[in-house]
Image (cartoon, coloured by chain):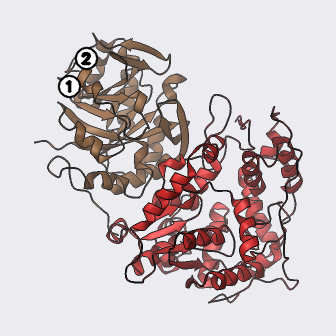
Chain colours: A red, B brown
Amino acid sequence: MKIIFCKNCLYGSTHPLGITFDNNGICSGCTVHKEKYTLDWRSRFSKLSKVIAQYRSRKNNYDCIIPITGAQDSYFIVHTAKKLGLKPLLVCYNKYFNTDVGIKNLSNLRIKFNLDVLFQNVNPNTVKKITRETLSRFGNIYWPIIAGHTVFPVQISIKYKIPLIIWGAHQGIEQVGMNSHEDEVEMSRRYRKDHDLFGYEAEDLLMISNNLKEADIYQYLYPDDYTLKKNSTRGIYLGNYIPWDTKKQHELMIKIYNYKTINFIRTIDCYDYVDCFNYMNIHDLLKIYKHGYSKITDQLSREIRFGRIDRESALKVVKKFEKRKPKFTKLFCDWLDVDYKSLNFVTESFINLLFWKKINLDNFKFMGWSYLNKLQSKKKIIKKKFSYTVNTKLKNNLNYITFGKGFS
Amino acid sequence: MNKKRLIATLVLLNDIVVQSIQFKRYLPLGKISFFLENLDRWGVDEIIILDINRSKFNIEPNFKLFEKIEKFKLKTPIIYGGNIRNKQDAINLIRYGADRIILGRNFFYKTSKIEEITQALGQQALIFSLPIIKKKNLFFYDHCSKKLICLKNFFIDKNLVSEIFITDVKHEGIQKGFDSNILRLYNQDNIPKIIFGGISSSYQIKKLLNFKNINAFAVGNFLSYKEHAFQNFLEHLPRNRFRLPTYKKN
């Protein structure tokens, strides 16, 4: 199988979200990214104001729901909502792999913005059961977290009769240019199943697993069409109305609200996923096993598009970071109650031979995107170095920070 | 009065569903199985799959796709178009599970070739595709050779196919698209039509309702932007001309 690479960024034709290339070899992600410089964003922001106007509560109730975490643009989304004069109800799914920095960020967000937060704490024994299942079935430890984070706001929308949910950027648009920003694409069940949940909704897990029971997946069930319609639930993405630049936005949040950031072993981006022990570690390892590239490729493709790094330098950085051994694996083994060897056995069973060559029983040679990507860009080298602000570090006594029902 | 149908169209490029813009630019959307499952739950009248690279690279129709589709046990009829070359391709597609098929450029230059397929499968299973570019006159757009062929003297025997699938190529994938002048200029009225290309709102459909012999409207990209996009179209269309939207309960 021949993999085509974008002449501008680092993305290849096997991107799991799907990707297209134009006649000049530029990927759909780069093409749509150009809209950030060509659209009239002032008028798009006015459009956002009009969209939300109809949702302002007259009964002093909440105007909208904002899903939050202790990282990932949460501050900027809430900051924008407040700027628009909205009174949001914040909702947070407890992912259990919480770092102390993530918890501090959450608590700081709650205090600085002075807003109500609802937490969902699914029984950790159930979460572990599902995690074991999704890890062994399709090599994913993050299914419960993504499923919870994307369904809890919808459930609360119905329970509290608050139709509007505000999300940050649309991952499909940011990475592979699934839609033009002008399409004003909204949250949908189809997108969630296809791209967020790896093709499996909660009820689908029951079809492939003998270990899970209906009660285990109950908290993750997406409301039906009739209920959604009756409540007029709607999820909009701010990225369609604001030229989304997560690095710049995080830096603004550091300055205004003292958002905390940390160093990671497998990437130079210190802003995203600071709330989680596993996203940039074992989850990222599984990504490179399965898809032949890791999160740093996503992050640096984005930075190339913003013109903050050139393609050649980005590729060098990717090669330096992507093969580093993930940290905190023991913590994960302890949490899931599996031994290290068993975990390795399972994770390595997902190594995709399209991107890895088997040398002997336990050894694989990496032949993923950064290895195959031999395209030379004609673009000028950007000499100015770009950097990330790191303003804290994880405390020495490492453990998942628990709250709610989060006993380990 | 017969009710009109509202059809969902999926454009397939290298096995992924894409947004197509004037059949020139494509943006990735996702895997076809999730689109089919979703559209089926929404209760669309029919689903058209346009597998556009098949004729460009002269590859056989995507028979394997129907093996994948089978497991979803869809209730919605599936119409397939994608380099159907001859009677055998047509029969195979129906055997694999397509409910109807779209015959395209392979038959444009010799429509009489359709007759043997009509005899084998029946007229009701066949739709003829006419991608049209409007200049002063109407032109057939051959997307493989990029040639334009004047449609002035083009007629297709009304006994060969059940419907004509007219695409406004210039406005395909563009909001507020379909050019009603195509219907004014198109001179064959004795075969029912399916209209496709740039239909992005129910308002546009309402404007086209008075044209003669339109059986159905096909919507593509615009069904993928929002939850219940299909039902939203129906909500704003006259109840006596279209059926009621449905919202599935668990």
Height in image: A344 above or below B101?
below
Mark 1 and mark 2 residues within 8 Å of each other at the beta carbon: yes
Height in image: A29 above or below A139?
above
Mark 1 to mark 2 CA distance (whole Å) = 9 Å
Percent of width and height locating residue B125? 27, 32
**Chain that bears disc 1:** B
What residue is shown at x 17% (from left), y 46% (from top)?
Answer: B241
Quickly name the residue at label 2: B156
What residue is shown at x 39% (from left), y 31% (from top)?
Answer: B92
Q: Describe residue B61's horizontal placement relative to residue A58 as left or right.
A: right
Q: Describe residue A101's horizontal placement relative to residue B237 as left or right.
A: right
Q: Is residue B134 visible?
A: yes
Height in image: B48 above or below A145?
above
- Neighbor class of circle 2 (other Cα within 10 Å; few <14, some 14-19, many 20+) is some
Q: Quadrant of residue B26?
A: top right
Q: How many marks?
A: 2
Quickly name the residue at label 1: B191
Percent of width and height locating residue A147? 56, 69
Q: What residue type is labelled 1?
A: Ile
